[in-house]
Image (tube, rainbow, N blue to C red):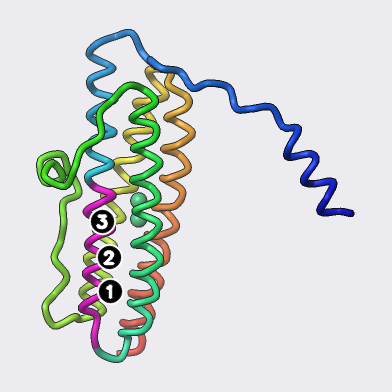
Amino acid sequence: MYKHSIFLREAQTPKETKVVQDPTSNEEEREKLLEYFRTSIADEFLAAFQYRQGYNVASGEHKADIENEMNSHYFEELGHAEKLEERLKQIGGKTFGPDKWKEYTRAGYTEPPEDGNCLQITIDNIEGEKKAVSYYREFAEFANKIGDYGTVNLVEGILADEEKHLHEFEELRKQFVDEN
Ligand SMILES: [Fe+2]
Ligand SMILES: [Fe+2]
């Protein structure tokens, strides 16, 4: 009965209003906004694959801890890339493939150490998350300045995830250091 009433309420929810096609009429602002999207999408994909590779090479006594973290972060960063791509399409921008990632990225890609050292993987990931946090703060501020509030909401949501990732990696680093 309870489930049934929830279903009815959801079914009656009006469809979401159409998103703005053009958040700004100023050409310079528009180009800068598209650039923020390109950079963050490239950064997200590269972060995802840095985590994937960390998952693949992790070794030693903390292997299982790192594998768990890397696996969940891999999917979360891919989720961020997908959301950013959706918004980019909504505002009339073009998506792109892996051949553009190195050109557009700001955070870059750090190859995990060959020996799979878990502390080093964690330290590299902290650096990456710090870059993400600072980039999304800048991105949200810019979107707010030009009045693109749909993008502000999206970016603030991602920023909160990156702050959580940073905190998790810092905790993990502390744990590894304390145990050694
Ligand atoms: Fe992300
Ligand atoms: Fe992250």
Image-based side of 11 in relation to 147, left or right: right
Image-based side of 96 in relation to 161, left or right: left
Q: Position of residue 113 (x, y in %)?
A: 13, 75
Q: Which stretch did the figure color magenta?
A: 43-59
Quadrant occupied by the C terminus: bottom left
Label 2, secondary structure: give it.
helix
Q: Amino acid at mark 2?
A: Tyr
Q: Quadrant of residue 11?
A: top right
Q: Position of residue 41 (x, y in %)?
A: 27, 42
Give the residue displayed 73% in from the left and 40% down from the top.
10
Q: Nearer the viewer, residue 97 or 27?
A: 97
Q: Amino acid at mark 3?
A: Ala
Q: Relative to 155, say whether 125 is above or below.
A: below
Q: Is residue 104 magenta?
A: no
Give the residue displayed 34% in from the left and 40% down from the top.
136
Graded by Cα atoms within 10 Å as few (under 14), some (14 to 19) or many (20 or more), the crowding at tag 3 reads many
Question: Which residue does the numbered mark 1 point to in the structure image?
Answer: 55
Task: Check if mark 1's residue and mark 2's residue have beta carbons within 8 Å.
Answer: yes
Label 1, secondary structure: give it.
helix
Of callouts 1 and 3, the N-terminal one? 3
Task: Check if mark 3's residue and mark 2's residue have beta carbons within 8 Å.
Answer: yes
Q: Position of residue 116 (x, y in %)?
A: 19, 80
Question: Which residue does the numbered mark 2 point to in the structure image?
Answer: 51
Q: Is mark 1 within 8 Å of ligand 2?
A: no
Ligand 2 positioned in quadrant: bottom left
Question: Which residue does the numbered mark 3 point to in the structure image?
Answer: 47
